[in-house]
């Protein structure tokens, strides 16, 4: 039995061990869980260095050179000051010096808070402006196909509002207004119109959350199908069965 079969066999056993939680809590699942967490932690440390620290900190601090020793970019040794600031975060494990861990935490929170103003603007302002959509068609026909057309013709088609576009925009605008009416909690809504919009908003939110939950379940089934495909195809059919047959 070669190394490949052993490796695939161990992977299959660990796969069944992790899915044994579906039956009940057991020690074998705990063992597989700890192995997985240990491997994930080790991989995360290596990925942290190779994907983040080396490119964003080390290379900028020491600079880069060619194979012959020629300098490509200068190193900025001020980046070395980030090392003691980062190490202060581990003082949280010390009862005497845990106050030092608040310094990098405060710096990170301050920088993150400043970035979030721009991030909020870049993320939500376009969404707010996108809710203003035309609901009256300018061309009383369905949107034509753009395959094989010139860029000018495609731009002309996109500049018009067709019946299908107007209907889609109308449903979208109605959904936005209904959902906003559902969150009118500041005052009592006695109007039947607002109450009806609030009820529609509740149902539309339930539909949206149901779709999100359904996509989450489908993603879990995708992971399950991938692992079962590995067990029954890669391990059993391609590795274990040929090995037993040759014996």
Image (cartoon, helix red, strand yellow):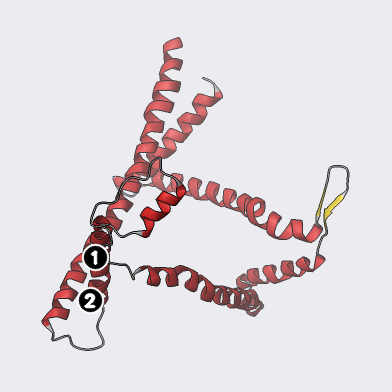
Q: Residue furthest right?
A: 69
Q: Residue furthest top?
A: 246
Q: Are marks 1 and 2 in contact (CB under 8 Å)?
A: no
Q: Residue furthest left?
A: 192
Q: Nearer the viewer, residue 34 or 108?
A: 108
Q: How many marks?
A: 2
Q: Which residue is mark 1?
A: 170
The image's mark for residue 110 is: none
| Relative height, residue 127 to residue 19 (above, below) | below
Q: Which residue is mark 2?
A: 182
Please give the name of the residue rendered at 73% of the width and 66% of the height, measured from the top-left corner.
83
Q: Quadrant of the C terminus?
A: top left
Q: Nearer the viewer, residue 62 or 131?
A: 131
Q: Position of residue 127 (x, y in %)?
A: 40, 68
- Where residue 132 sits, quadrant-wise, is bottom left
Using the rendered image of the protein, determine whether residue 247 is visible from the camera's viewpoint.
no
Q: Position of residue 149 (x, y in %)?
A: 41, 43
Q: Secondary structure at mark 2?
A: helix
Please give the name of the residue rendered at 44% of the width and 72% of the height, measured from the top-left corner.
125
In the image, is 9 to the left or to the right of 54? left
In the image, is 178 to the left or to the right of 120? left
Q: First in sequence: mark 1 or mark 2?
A: 1
Please give the name of the residue rendered at 38% of the width and 41% of the height, measured from the top-left corner.
147
Q: Position of residue 120 (x, y in %)?
A: 48, 73
Q: Nearer the viewer, residue 189 or 166?
A: 166
| Relative height, residue 184 to residue 26 (above, below) | below
Q: Secondary structure at mark 1?
A: helix
Q: Nearer the viewer, residue 176 or 114?
A: 176
Q: Using the numbered discs, state the Cα–Cα distance from disc 1 to disc 2 in whole angstroms.
A: 18 Å
Q: Position of residue 69 (x, y in %)?
A: 88, 46
């Amino acid at each position: 039995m070669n190394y490949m079969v052993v490796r695939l066999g161990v992977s299959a056993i660990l796969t069944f061990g992790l899915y044994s939680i579906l039956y009940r809590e057991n020690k074998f699942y705990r063992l597989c869980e700890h192995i997985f967490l240990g491997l994930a932690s080790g991989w995360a440390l290596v990925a942290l260095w190779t994907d983040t620290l080396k490119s964003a900190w080390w290379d900028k601090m020491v600079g880069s050179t060619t194979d012959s020793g020629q300098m490509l970019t200068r190193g900025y040794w001020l980046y070395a000051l980030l090392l003691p600031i980062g190490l202060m975060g581990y003082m949280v494990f010390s009862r005497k010096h845990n106050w030092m861990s608040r310094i990098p935490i405060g710096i990170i929170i301050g920088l993150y808070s400043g970035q979030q103003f721009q991030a909020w603007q870049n993320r939500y302002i376009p969404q707010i402006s996108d809710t203003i959509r035309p609901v009256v068609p300018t061309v009383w026909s369905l949107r034509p196909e753009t395959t094989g057309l010139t860029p000018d013709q495609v731009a002309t088609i996109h500049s018009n509002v067709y019946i299908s576009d107007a209907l889609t925009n109308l449903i979208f605008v109605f959904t936005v207004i209904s959902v906003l009416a559902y969150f009118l909690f500041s005052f009592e809504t006695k109007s039947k119109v607002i109450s009806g919009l609030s009820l529609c908003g509740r149902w539309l939110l339930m539909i949206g959350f149901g779709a999100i939950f359904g996509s989450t379940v489908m993603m879990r089934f995708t992971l399950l199908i991938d692992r079962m495909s590995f067990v029954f195809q890669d391990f059993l059919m391609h590795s274990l069965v040929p090995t037993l047959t040759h014996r």
